[in-house]
Image (tube, grey):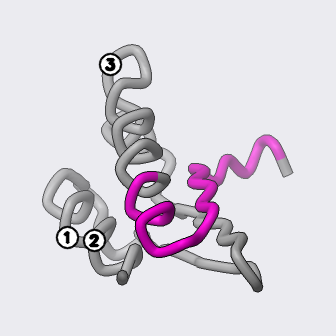
Amino acid sequence: MNLEAFLRDVLTPLLDHPDAFRIEIAGEGRKRDVLIFADPRDRGRIIGKHGRMISALRTLCKTAGEKAGLAVDLELYDKDEA
């Protein structure tokens, strides 16, 4: 299971600034934290209307992770939160 490749294939065509897009996967054991970094102008495209896109991505990653025996948490990095 390659979550990074999946997310890159799904999200890159949607972005106006794909050069600023990157994904970090951290964690050990059964837990994986997936962090998506994108240009602030592309965040709305990743979130989608009423959060539907990011919610669907979280569901897909969580389900794929469960099939591989992993607990996956997907987040969109917001520099204002850090």
What's drawn in magenta, residue-wise?
63-81
Which x, y percent locates residue 68?
A: 46, 74
**Residue at 63% from the left image edge and 62% from the top image edge:** 71
* Label pair 1/2, CB-CB below 8 angstroms: yes
Considering only order in the chain, which callout, 1 or 3, is on the residue closer to the N terminus?
1
Dividing the picture into quadrants, the one containing residue 4 is bottom left
Most foreground residue, 34 or 77: 34
Q: Is residue 42 visible?
A: no
Badges 3 and 1: C-beta atoms under 8 Å apart?
no
Give, as a three-letter code, the residue at label 1. Asp
Q: Nearer the viewer, mark 2 or mark 3?
A: 2
Identified by mark 2, the residue type is Phe
| Quadrant of the image occupied by residue 54 | top left
Separation of residues labelled 2 and 3 (CA atoms):
21 Å
Residue, x 27% and y 71% (percent of image)?
6
> Is 76 within the magenta?
yes
Distance CA(mark 1)–CA(mark 2): 5 Å
Residue pointed to by mark 3:
49
Element under disc 1: helix
How crowded pointer 3 is (Cα within 10 Å; few <14, some 14-19, many 20+) is rated as few
- Which of labels 1 and 2 is toward the front? 2
In the picture provided, is 32 more to the left or to the right than 16?
A: right
Task: Work out whether residue 57 or residue 36 is closer to the camera in this orientation and state it.
Answer: 57
Q: Is residue 64 above or below residue 46?
A: below
Q: Which mark is residue 71?
A: none
Which element is circle 3 on?
A: helix
How far across and down, in percent of the image, does residue 32 sit? 66, 71
List the residue tagged with mark 2.
6
Q: Amino acid at mark 3?
A: Lys
Which residue does the numbered mark 1 point to in the structure image? Answer: 9
Is 74 rendered above or below residue 21?
A: above
Residue drawn at the location 59% of the way across and 66% of the way down: 34
